[in-house]
Image: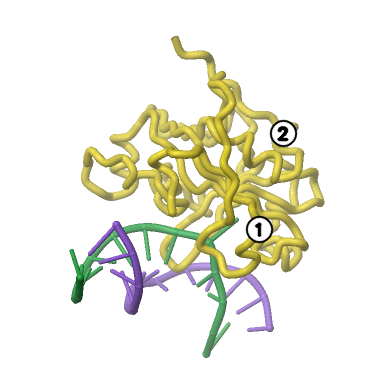
Chain colours: A yellow, B purple, C green
Amino acid sequence: MKSALRILTPSFYDRDPRLVGPDLLGKILVRREERKLLMGRIVEVEAYLGSEDPAAHASVGKTARNAVLFGPPGYAYVYFIYGNHYCLNVSCLPDGVPGGILFRAVEPIQGMKAMFKLRGIDESPDLRRLTRGPGRLAAAFGITRQRDNGKDLTSSRSDLYIADDGAPASQVLITKRIGIKKAADMPLRYIVPGNRFVSG
DNA sequence: GGAGCGATGTCCT
DNA sequence: GGACATCGCTCCG
């Protein structure tokens, strides 16, 4: 029996990213795509802070690009990187205080056929090709800056949100963040230990 | 299976 | 002009 999905509320995100990050593991990322529902269980995220975190986009201060990170909690910050890929984040902390969480990997639960199509690859038994890594994950869920940046992820009217399906709290392993040059030693990456969809 | 590298948009100096 | 919170393709073992 599957419990009803409960969308995470602004108060969930209105906390330090170091608290929000581990709590997001095991939650469900949901995309409504026409008549289809795409769902994945979150297994890897990273926290990005404010001025005290040189790796964070917010560390340089508020700009047009990163403004969502400085806004109210629970909004999508989507940026384009390396000329090829989008990455999805959610803003944390109250309006005016920057911080967020980068979604790095999910385990596909539903809508895999649509995900393969959005990724532009042939269907294969290895679902890790769909959603392992932030760029792949964004592609599989059809996430772009144009479509999703600034979107409220706490609204039931949104086509993109994060929900709790009542699963027990996940085990959490904390490691250094990966794929960055600055502040590479800060322990701000949260993963489900042993999960095959975790990147790196 | 792992190291090396090109692709390529956007922001910042 | 350079950096960049990445990925997929080579080539080599």
Dot 1: element: loop
Q: Is label 2 in contact with label 1 (beta carbons under 8 Å)?
A: no
> Is A128 or A113 nearer to us in this picture?
A128
Query: Which disc, if any, is residue A144?
Result: none
Which residue sits at x=42%, y=42%? A141
User: Residue under mark 2: which chain is it in?
Assistant: A
Using the image, determine if residue A107 lies above or below residue A176. above
Q: CA distance from mark 2 to mark 1?
A: 26 Å
Is residue A161 visible in this depiction of the protein?
no
User: Callout 1: 10 Å neighbours few (<14), some, many (20+)?
Assistant: few
Q: Which mark is residue A10?
A: 2
Q: Quadrant of the N terminus of chain A?
A: top left
Residue A12 is situated, as x and y percent measured from the top left of the image, at: 71, 32
Determine whether the residue tagged by mark 2 lies in a helix, strand or loop: helix
Q: Amino acid at mark 1?
A: Met
Residue A87 x, y percent position in the rendering:
51, 54
Query: Label 1 lies in what chain?
Result: A
Does A119 sit left or right of A152 as displayed?
Answer: left
Is the residue A187 above or below the residue A169 in the image?
below
- Image quadrant where one finds the C terminus of chain A: bottom left
Of residues A64 and A197, the one drawn nearer to the viewer in this rendering = A197
Q: Is residue A97 visible?
A: yes
Residue sitting at the far top: A1
Amino acid bearing label 2:
Pro
> What residue sits right under mark 1 in the picture?
A186
Q: Is residue A118 left or right of residue A193?
A: left
Name which residue lies at 63% across and 42% down. A21
> Which is closer to the viewer, label 2 or label 1?
1
Name the residue located 53 percent from the left edge and 46 percent from the top edge: A103
Q: Which of the 4 quarters of the picture holds residue B4? A: bottom left
Q: Dot 2 surroundings within 10 Å: few (below 14), some, or many (20 or more)?
A: many
Where is residue A55 shown, x and y percent of the image? Answer: 64, 64
